[in-house]
Amino acid sequence: MNGVSMEAGLLLAAILFILGLFGVLIRRNIIFMLISVEIMLNAAGLAFIVAGMRWAQPDGQIMFIFILTMAAAEVSVGLALILQLYHQLKTLDSDAASRMRG
């Protein structure tokens, strides 16, 4: 069974992580920032899968399942915060959220 080489898998994971990082840094919409964080988490999970495949250990798959559960929790809390922010400010712009007064 021939799979993807380790170099190609890690290169793809690095490219996905960089795209997610640029999405977080450049975008102002909070939903797009949340999606970019999800891309970054999936890139880290892909790196674990590739490394686990290289050494024929199931640890990479176990870590990927942990990353998926963490991402699900992050999305549920993030979407709840986004809904509350939209109710108060009527916008999803992150600059408007940074001007909030406590």
Image: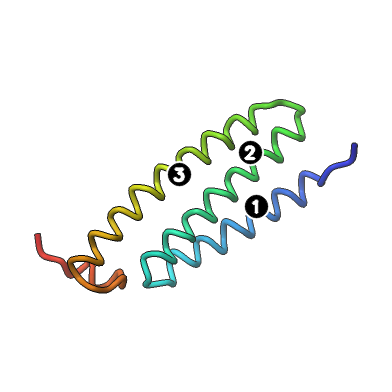
Which numbered dot is residue 13? Answer: 1
Residue type of the residue flagged with mark 3: Ala
**Residue 26: x percent and y percent?**
44, 72
Disc 3 is placed on an element classified as helix
Camera-side mark, 1 or 3: 3
Q: Residues within 10 Å of mark 3 (few under 14, many from 20)?
A: few
Residue at numbered disc 3: 72
* The N terminus: image quadrant: top right
Tell me the CA gap for discs 3 and 2: 18 Å
Mark 1 or 3, nearer chain start: 1
Q: Which mark is residue 48?
A: 2
What residue type is disc 2 on? Phe
Pointer 1 or 2: first along the chain? 1
Please rate how many residues cluster around mark 2, counting C-alpha atoms within 10 Å: few if below 14, some from 14 to 19, many from 20: many
Q: How is the image coloured?
A: rainbow
Residue positioned 68% across, 26% down in the render: 58
Amino acid type assigned to the residue bearing label 1 in the image: Ala
Please say if 46 is above or below 22.
above
Task: Say whether disc 3 or disc 2 marks the residue closer to the N-terminus.
Answer: 2
Q: Is residue 28 above or below residue 35?
A: below
Q: On the rendered structure, is 41 left or right of 89?
A: right
Q: Identify which residue, 80 or 36, lies in the foreground.
A: 80
Q: Name above or below for residue 25 compared with residue 79.
A: below
Foreground residue, 84 or 25? 84
